[in-house]
Amino acid sequence: MELRHIRYFMAVAEERNVTRAAEKLGIGQPPLSQQIHALEDELGVRLFRRTGHGVVLTEAGEAFVIDAKRVLDDARQAIENAQSAGRGEMGQLNIGFTGSAAFNPVVVNLIRKFRQSYPAVSLTLAEGNTAQLLAYLDDGRLDVAFVRLGNQSPAGVAFHHIAVEPMKLVLPTTHPLAKKRNVPLIALAQDPFVLLPREVSPTLNDVILGACRDAGFAPVIGQQAPQLSSVVNLVAAEFGVSLVPASVCQIRVEGVVYADIPGENISIRLALASRKDATTAKIANFLAIANESSLSPVAE
């Protein structure tokens, strides 16, 4: 039994007239009658009873029409689902982000816009450091990832610039310089710095150590933190001081203050990474929304 036979049957059942059904289907009346007869022969029952004004459904036809309608509805839905998936309007998108990227309003806005534009696409979010996220991107566990861009330039990965964030100092409120809005980095040369391990966040680590080096000192390495939010908590506990991306200042923890660094242009880049060979519509749609937000490719 072919799907077109069911469509022919339903057209005749709805019109109650073979000639009108043929016109509706855009085929001749004789071929349509032959197809209906073939369907009845295949089922071994009569579906229609002929009358002087057209046809009426038999009991078998009345029973068949219920399931036939469901089959056509299911087929129509299957087609719509396939087309929708092909356009990237449904399915799943796997997004990765570094701990600090999650605080950036650009990241939040992009994800919100995508959800509003494609509500049938479910999102899975995974947090990790940049090295982990790029590895997950490479093996297909992630579709896109928000990363802190340093010197990494793995083959097969495209980066789109999102933002350059200034770095801020985070100090315990008990620090002698805590009441100052601007604190020269050299003034902290004797303070221990709370850092993420380099293997966890090489870019952030390099930015902080490089800034201290440019200021004329090698920082005292203090307590290491497992994640960026823990850096702020450890500073609050007076383990030392640190530098964090400006968006992290949204973390309001009792016992810390944030300060600017005068005369310094210390910043860290945030980028959206995707595989160059990624061809799924969902990824293309996400990148399109990102591009609408004036993102630009990062030069290799």
Image (cartoon, helix red, strand yellow):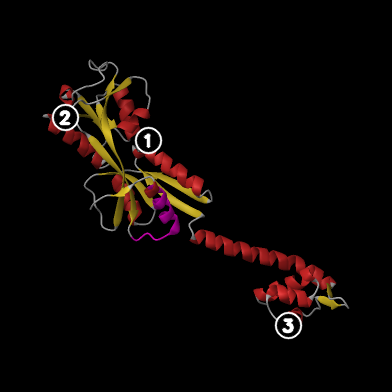
Tell me the residue at 83%/75% (across/down): 55
| Magenta highlight range | 277-290
- Amino acid type at mark 2: Pro
Amino acid type at mark 1: Phe
Question: Which quadrant of the figure contains the N terminus?
Answer: bottom right
Indicate the position of residue 76 as horizontal and vertical percent values.
63, 64
Identify the residue position indicated by label 1 in the image. Answer: 103
Please give the label number shown on residue 35. none
Looking at the picture, tell me which residue is in the foreground, 43 or 62: 62
Task: Please give the count of numbered marks on the rendered protein.
Answer: 3
Residue 280 sits inside the magenta stretch: yes
Per the image, label 1 sits on a secondary structure element best described as helix
**Label 2–label 1 contact, CB within 8 A:** no
- Do tag 1 and tag 3 residues touch (Cβ < 8 Å)? no
Q: CA distance from mark 1 to mark 3?
A: 66 Å
Name the element at disc 3.
Answer: helix
Label 3, on which residue? 38
Circle nearer the N terminus (2, 1): 1
Residue placed under numbered mark 2 in the picture: 219
**Is 203 on the left-hand or right-hand side of 8?**
left
Q: Relative to 109, does residue 291 appear above or below in the rendering?
A: below
Q: Earlier in the sequence, mark 1 or mark 3?
A: 3
